[in-house]
Amino acid sequence: MKLKHFFDYKRYYIPLGLFLIFALILWKGLSLAPKSFPDLTSGRQLPNFTLPLLDDPMKIITEAELKGEVGLLHVWATWCSVCLQEHAELLNLKKQYPEYPIYGLSFQDENEAVLSWLHSQGNPFKFSMSDEEGHLAFELGLRGTPETFIIDKQGIIRHHHIGMLTLEEFEKNILPKLKSLSHELKA
C-alpha cells in the first residue's frame, strides 16, 4: 500500500522538480547583464555596406560616409520601447556634444514609422540609414536594440555599448573614449 502512494507522489513530484530546475536556469539566465558579454566587435573594421538614406531612399550610403571623423553609430527601432525612452537622451547628446556626430541605423523598422517619429520628436542623427532586413546590424554583432558603436576616423569600431545610452553613461564611459580617439588621431 505504501509503495503505491510513493509512485503516485512520484508522478507529481518529478514534473514539479523538473519545472523548478528549468525555472531556476531561466531565472539565472535572465539575471545576466547583457553588458557582461564579451565585446567581439571592437577593433574590427566597419563592414562594407550599401543602405538607403532613410529620408531619401534613392540616395545610397556606404561605410565610407562614416569615415573621416570620430562618431557614434546608433542602432534603434520605433518598435523598441527602450529606444523611444532613450530618444530624449540622444537629442541632449547632440546639443551638448555636437562635435561627435551620431549616425542612425533604423533596424528592421518601417521607414514611415521612423520618419514620423523623428519628425515629431526631433532628429538627433547627422543622417539615418534604413536597415529593413537587418543585414548590417547582424554583421555588427547586434544583440538587441538599442546599441551604439564608437567609430573612429578610419572606420574602425572602437567600442560597442549595449543598451540604453544615458547622458550619465555617455559622459562616464563613452566621452572619454571619443576624446581619446580624437586626440590620438590628431597627433
Image (cartoon, helix red, strand yellow):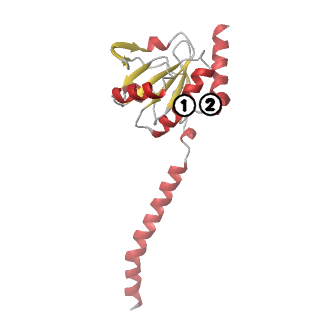
| In this picture, residue 180 sits left or right of residue 74 | right
**Neighbourhood count class around disc 2 (C-alpha, 10 Å): few under 14, some 14–19, many 20 upward:** some
Element type at mark 2: helix
Residue 173, image x and y in percent?
65, 29
- According to the picture, the residue beneath numbered tag 1 turns out to be 88
| The N terminus lies in quadrant | bottom left
Q: Is residue 90 left or right of residue 168?
A: left
| Residue beneath the point at 57% across and 32% down | 165
- Please give the name of the residue rendered at 57% of the width and 40% of the height, measured from the top-left corner: 36
Residue that appears at 41% across and 83% down: 6
Q: Residue at x 55, y 27 (%)?
A: 90
Q: Which mark is residue 167?
A: 2
Q: Which of these two is toward me, 136 or 93? A: 93
On the rendered image, what quadrant is the C terminus found in? Answer: top right
Query: Residue 44 placed where, x, y %?
Result: 51, 21
Q: Earlier in the sequence, mark 2 or mark 1?
A: 1
| 10 Å crowding of disc 1: few (<14), some (14-19), many (20+) | some
The answer to whether residue 11 is seen in the rendering is yes
